[in-house]
Image (tube, grey):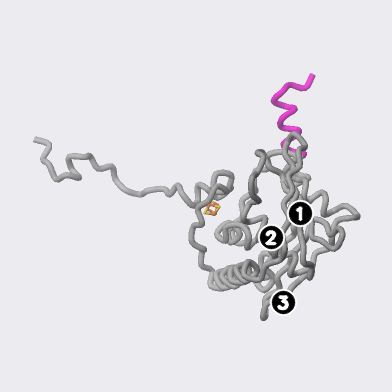
């Protein structure tokens, strides 16, 4: 009989392999094409994803929701938007009634949408030339929380600024600065960002204060 631990690892492996299949494909070497997903999250994370990636830990099937919807026949096709010589690539989960629709998992009932989801939704409205959009959060208990948004130019300008920053840093091979947020806790690069190996000798308090041991 399959034990609880085996069952968990089967589910985890299934979630990981489906997650890999559903991942938005990014050509790490093509620094003139930036995906919207890369600039609405921490730029440092996106930089590491391209130059020295580490696999993300997926928490469950709920995390795969948006990717699965994009693959279905009523999912939308990816689209590009030119910003000077850079191509911004976006992919809405769905377009319904001339509105962009995003689906996101959540563990809690949200009072307001997440900032990075708002940036993603708003940018999709510009990329697909739509005026309205909605984000539908779905909890583990299958409750739905819906937020609607009308497109906003200033918010899109912020996305454009971040696209230029990421493209320049990739070209110069410079690691972006830390962008500490709640996302750091689940980030696969947490140790790289916040836990540095110190190559220093141990110093006692008395030595630090310049006191003799005698
Ligand atoms: S740990 Fe935080 S600052 Fe570091 S890459 Fe991840 S999200 Fe960015």
Q: Residue 51's x, y, as percent? A: 59, 61
Task: List the single residue furthest toward the bottom.
Answer: 84
Q: Is label 2 in a helix, a strand or a loop?
A: helix
134 with respect to 196 (left or right): right
Q: Is residue 47 inside the magenta stretch? A: no
Q: Is label 1 in a helix, a strand or a loop?
A: strand
210 with respect to 154 (left or right): left
Q: Are marks 2 and 3 in contact (CB under 8 Å)?
A: no
Circle on res. 102: 1
Q: Residue 107's x, y, as percent? A: 66, 38
Q: In the rendered image, which quarter contains the C terminus? A: top left
Foreground mark, 2 or 3, reads 2
The Cα–Cα distance between marks 3 and 1, rounded to whole angstroms, is 22 Å
Relative to 138, is 95 above or below?
A: below
Q: Is label 3 in a helix, a strand or a loop?
A: strand
Q: Residue 122's x, y, as percent? A: 70, 63
Label 2: how many residues lie within 10 Å, few (<14), some (14-19) or many (20+)? many
**What is the tally of numbered marks visible in this picture?**
3
| Most foreground residue, 91 or 121 | 121
Residue located 32% across and 48% down the image: 200
Q: Are marks 3 and 1 in contact (CB under 8 Å)?
A: no
Q: Are marks 1 and 2 in contact (CB under 8 Å)?
A: yes
Residue 20 visible in the displayed image: no
Foreground mark, 3 or 1, reads 1
The Cα–Cα distance between marks 2 and 3, rounded to whole angstroms, is 16 Å
Label 1: how many residues lie within 10 Å, few (<14), some (14-19) or many (20+)? many
Q: Which residue is mark 2?
A: 120
Residue located 83% across and 57% down the image: 94
Give the residues in magenta: 1-14
| Most foreground residue, 58 or 163 | 163
Quarter holding residue 90 = bottom right
Residue 121 visible in the displayed image: yes
């Amino acid at each position: 009989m399959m034990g609880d631990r085996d069952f968990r690892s089967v589910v985890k492996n299934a979630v990981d392999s489906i997650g890999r299949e559903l991942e938005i494909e990014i050509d790490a070497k093509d620094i003139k094409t930036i995906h919207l997903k890369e600039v609405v999250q921490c730029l440092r994370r996106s930089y590491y994803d391209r130059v020295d990636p580490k696999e993300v830990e997926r928490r469950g099937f709920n995390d795969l929701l948006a990717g699965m919807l994009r693959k279905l026949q009523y999912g939308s096709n990816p689209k590009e938007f030119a910003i000077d010589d850079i191509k911004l690539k976006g992919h809405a989960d769905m377009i319904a009634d001339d509105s962009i629709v995003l689906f996101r998992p959540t563990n809690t009932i949200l009072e307001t949408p997440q900032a990075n989801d708002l940036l993603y939704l708003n940018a999709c409205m510009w990329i697909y030339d739509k005026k309205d959009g909605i984000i539908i959060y779905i909890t583990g208990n299958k409750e739905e929380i819906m937020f609607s948004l009308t497109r906003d130019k200033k918010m899109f300008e912020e996305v454009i600024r971040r696209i230029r920053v990421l493209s320049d840093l990739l070209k110069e091979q410079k690691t972006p600065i830390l962008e500490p947020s709640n996302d750091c806790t689940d980030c696969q690069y947490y140790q790289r960002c916040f836990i540095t190996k110190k190559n220093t000798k141990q110093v006692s308090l008395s030595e630090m204060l310049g006191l003799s041991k005698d």
